[in-house]
Image (cartoon, rainbow, N blue to C red):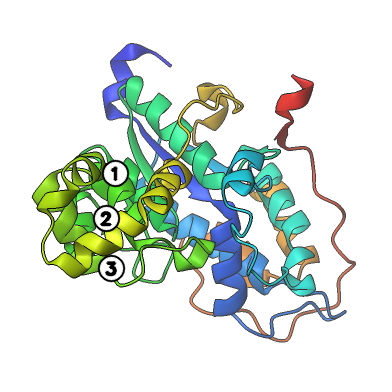
Amino acid sequence: MNSDDRSNSTLLIVDGTAVAYRAFYAIAGLTTSSGQPTNAVFGFVRMFRQLGRLLQPSHRVVVFDGGLPAERVEKCPEYKAQRTPMPDDLRSQFAPIEEYLAQAQIPVVRVLGQEADDVMASMSVAAQQLGMSVAMATSDKDLFQLVTDRVCIVSPSKALDKMGPNEVFEKTGVWPDKIVDWQSLTGDAVDNISGVPGIGPKTAARLVQDFGSVEQLLARIQEVQPERIRLLLETHQDLIRRNMGLMKLRVDLTEYPPWEAMRTTPEDPLRLTPFFEKLDLHSLAEELKQGGPPLAAPSRPKRQKPTPNSQELFLFDPDKM
């Protein structure tokens, strides 16, 4: 990429796992005539196209979870342990989702032993260093900590709400660079990370605002009022420090494709139409001709052969590099 066009470049990073989950539960009962579930595939493609139309990115990439990091599980054995297994009907759709991405020439990244948000954080920081703007499509609030004037979060929902620094502050009561401090006090129920009992989001935000950081809060803990809050903090200092380490995303991962491989290219009907037709996703095939978003999930699918396995994608195992 030439330095001259970096300031006008926008990288769209899609949290593929989160978008697939959301699509699966948002659209019910969509299958091929042979009974193969396709609701997550349909919703994923539709969301990806809508993001492209909204953001007009010069580059795009999809990141999938590659497993739980051993260091987080070691610090917190209960980390995400409460989550129910992925439904079989969703798991079976990741192969066709990845095949769509391959046919659309959209790079996929999955780093074994790393969560998607750490990879997204690393790519976001690297892109900013090149002068690019970044949009991250995700429902993971852990990524709030990455938001800047040049990095926004887009909710993968019908509204496609964009969140910049002001929106993060309105939602949490702290600025993005203090999200880790705030979360170290509140914990994260979604990830099964306990916070300080008795300290909710508003109290946590006030403490971070008053003391500037958790480090300063613990250093000046005798100044905390009321006494009830001070005693809670004193009792749970180890928990707070542990949470700081858990909540901080990695920004040093480098296992992703070259930037040029992420450059946006037009969808090719010759590659994608047969793929959509074999999954009975006729409205998505029609969209290639019409250039507009599908308005509803397709109905009365025609009988087609089952989808083959996923095509080649970027897959990295740090232990083998």
Q: Is residue 192 above or below residue 207?
A: below
The picture quadrant where one finds residue 82 is bottom right
Question: Closer to the N terminus: mark 2 or mark 3?
Answer: 2
Q: Nearer the viewer, mark 2 or mark 3?
A: 3
Write the residue at 46% across / 63% down. Answer: 194
Q: Residues within 10 Å of mark 1 (few under 14, many from 20)?
A: many
Residue at disc 1, secondary structure:
loop
Q: Residues within 10 Å of mark 3 (few under 14, many from 20)?
A: some
Residue 129 pos. (x, y %)? 34, 21
- Front-most of residues 141 and 196: 196
The quadrant of the image that shows the C terminus is top right
Q: Nearer the viewer, mark 1 or mark 2?
A: 1
Task: Identify which amino acid the numbered label 3 is placed on.
Answer: Ile
3D distance between C-alphas at marks 3 and 1: 25 Å
Write the residue at 80% across / 79% down. Answer: 302
Task: Identify which amino acid the numbered label 1 is placed on.
Answer: Val
Q: What number is the disc on residue 163?
A: 2
Question: Closer to the N terminus: mark 1 or mark 2?
Answer: 1
According to the image, label 1 marks what residue? 147
Q: Is residue 48 above or below residue 111?
A: below
Q: Is residue 247 left or right of residue 110?
A: left
Task: Identify which amino acid the numbered label 2 is placed on.
Answer: Met
According to the image, label 3 marks what residue? 199
Asked if marks 2 and 3 touch (Cβ < 8 Å), the reply is no
